[in-house]
Image (spheres, coloured by chain):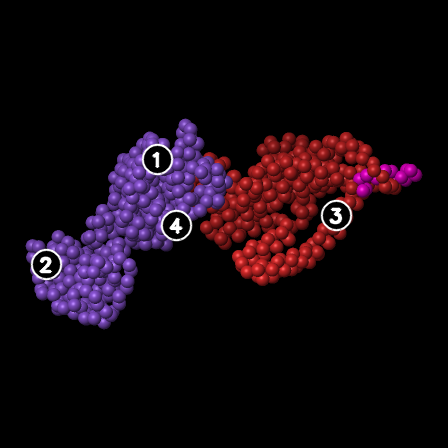
Chain colours: A red, B purple
Amino acid sequence: MAIAGFSGGTAKGSSKRNSKGASKSALKGDRKGAIVAGILLIPGLLYLALFFLTPLVQLVVTALESPDASGAIGAYVYDFNVQNFADVAVKYSLQIFRSFGYAFLATIFALLISYPLAYFVGVKVRRWPLLQRMTLVLVIAPFFISFLLRTVAWKQLLSVGSPLLGVLQNIGLVPHDGYFIGTPAAVVFGLTYNFIPFMTLPLFTTLERLDGRLIEAGADLYANPFKVFTKITLPLSMPGVVSGTLLTFIPIAGDYVNASRDFLGSSDTSMIGNMVDQDFLSNQNYPYASALSVLLMATILILVSIYVRRAGTEELL
Amino acid sequence: MERRYQWCGITLANSVKASSSGAALELVNIRKEFPGFTAIEDLDLKINAGEFFALLGPSGCGKTTTLRIVAGLETPTSGRVFLGGEDITDTKPHQRAVNTVFQSYALFPHMTVLDNVAFGLRQRKVDEPLKKAQDALALVELSHLADRRPQQLSGGQQQRVALARAIVNRPSLLLLDEPLGALDLKLRRQMQIELKAIQIEVGLTFLHVTHDQEEAMDMADTVAVMNKGRIEQMGAPEALYDRPKTAFVSKFLGQSNLFVGDVVETNDSAVSINLHGNKITVPVARAEKTAGKIAVGVRPEKVQFHESAPAAAAGQNILGPGEIIDIRFTGVSNQYLIEIPQVGSVTVFAQNVGKSPVVELGAQVWVSFKVEHAFGLADLPVGTEED
């Protein structure tokens, strides 16, 4: 893609010249440009081959391994054991369902919270650049603190005996003898909270460029504020919605911090990540852990490609 | 011109039948203050139903703000807006039977041309929106581009889509916010003719905001010249051009030669002014002032020059002698700049029809113009008040 763009630009520039010699030298320049682009790409390609492609192949190979004949724990031999995938799909069906269910809910909540926030920062305070920058910093500021630290802090804030939980109990959101930490709600809450900036920032970027004159034109053409939003603002901000939901949904589906027992979850809330963690580090069942990882990756890939196609964002640009 | 109207005849047959004709617009005592400055000061305006009204002024004079107040996109600080006799000051833009052709066109990039045009109809749940949108596109001769996206169109085509998107709704009042500003001269002239033809055809009230005085005079039935948030003068283009009442109008609408002097004599028919020893006479009916210091103007094409001193005659103002300091050939006419001692410089436009004497730079000439062509202004040009 980069090479094509590079040489394409040169060819266009040179085609304006008509003399034969010029076009010949342009052709030479074209090849030179392609070589330069190729050289510039080498570090990136090397990096990808070394740190992405190799581990990926390694992962798939491990996912197909069979237990060693000796039966020793953690000993496996190379094989083509496709059964591993069927095994993990059945064994962890609940966790797989939970992962995507939580990811779906947390993405929706993050979108519902982030959209008005991004609209406020990107559109409403646009006239005051200083205020805009300040509100943007306010949105991002909590995320200068470590992800783990913030999640632990929420655990403290919401555990039994904390004043915040007391308030929630008093207003009836949580039963008086009930608890919050360890419930699916706590995990979805944590996931939503932790991934909000990944939703807000892409939304902000598209909404910041939203042409206010189109909103005025919509109002001028008899659209009430709700119609203006659904017919103009939302369709025009779809690129932000799509990238925001992808940037939250994909990492949330693979998250294992929020759902783990050490943070906001319990054994009843474990997601795919927790199972990979357990199989790999505790059970030393590397083929299962790998097969589950590959399965997660493949499912996300399929879901995302369906989503992007249906969202039809390519029409927008 | 004839072909154009014939074309209109054709489109009349297949265009949407006007469901409503234009309504009158009345602005009463409109005032708009922004933090730090006042954009509009106590503006009163009345536009008759079916009229093509142009609001003409330099940038920053408040004309676009006036238009946005009518559209409902700005709220006036004080004053009322009446459309067809109904007070619409407090209604929202989408509740007003007013449509705008925006300066930037503001076409929706995520919709096809056809969907853009049908947008307003769909919002009002009008029957057969797509068919009516097609008809509107036919009116602006863009039927073949209905499925394109606005960004695939040229500026002139986008302008016509914006126009179709507005007039398809048959608004009581159509607002035009310098929609021709981004087009090149040739296309602009062509669009002016088309716009005027469409206005005659559909019978809507048009409020056209522009800084192009030629455009305003060419298209509008009534022109209001705006300056610094106020309307300086309002009237038919011919009347405004023939008798500007302020120095601003005389300079902004066409060109003027202005002479500042003291009134020496006023009788029933004429006001005489002493201009450093030269006498200039203006009909009383054409003078805004009859005493004190006054600015008298005359249009450059109403002035003749002579190689010898013309004989004094009643009904003629004669100045000179002076020296020709600049000659410009502009095709249909020559523009001469004549410097007359004590009086100042006088611009003369002479049509190249062989009637003007052939002169060269530096030649000594006299200028004359008819008394009935002179006009007396209510104010003095900027910079001469302290003389």
Magenta residues, as a range? A61-73
Asked whether residue A94 is in view, the answer is yes
Taking depth in this image into account, of A171 and A313 the one nearest to the observer is A313
Q: Is residue A60 left or right of residue B180?
A: right
How far apart, in angstroms, are the residues tagged by discs 3 and 1? Answer: 64 Å
Q: Mark 4 points at which residue?
A: B183
Q: Are marks 3 and 1 on the same chain?
A: no
Q: Are marks 1 and 2 on the same chain?
A: yes
- Neighbor class of circle 3 (other Cα within 10 Å; few <14, some 14-19, many 20+) is few
Which of disc 4 and disc 2 is earlier in sequence?
4
How far apart, in angstroms, are the residues tagged by discs 2 and 4? Answer: 45 Å
Q: Nearer the viewer, mark 3 or mark 1?
A: 1
Q: What residue type is labelled 2?
A: Gly
Q: In this view, does A277 lie to the left or right of A79?
A: left
How far apart, in angstroms, are the residues tagged by discs 2 and 3? Answer: 98 Å
Q: Mark 1 points at which residue?
A: B11
Q: Mark 2 points at which residue?
A: B315
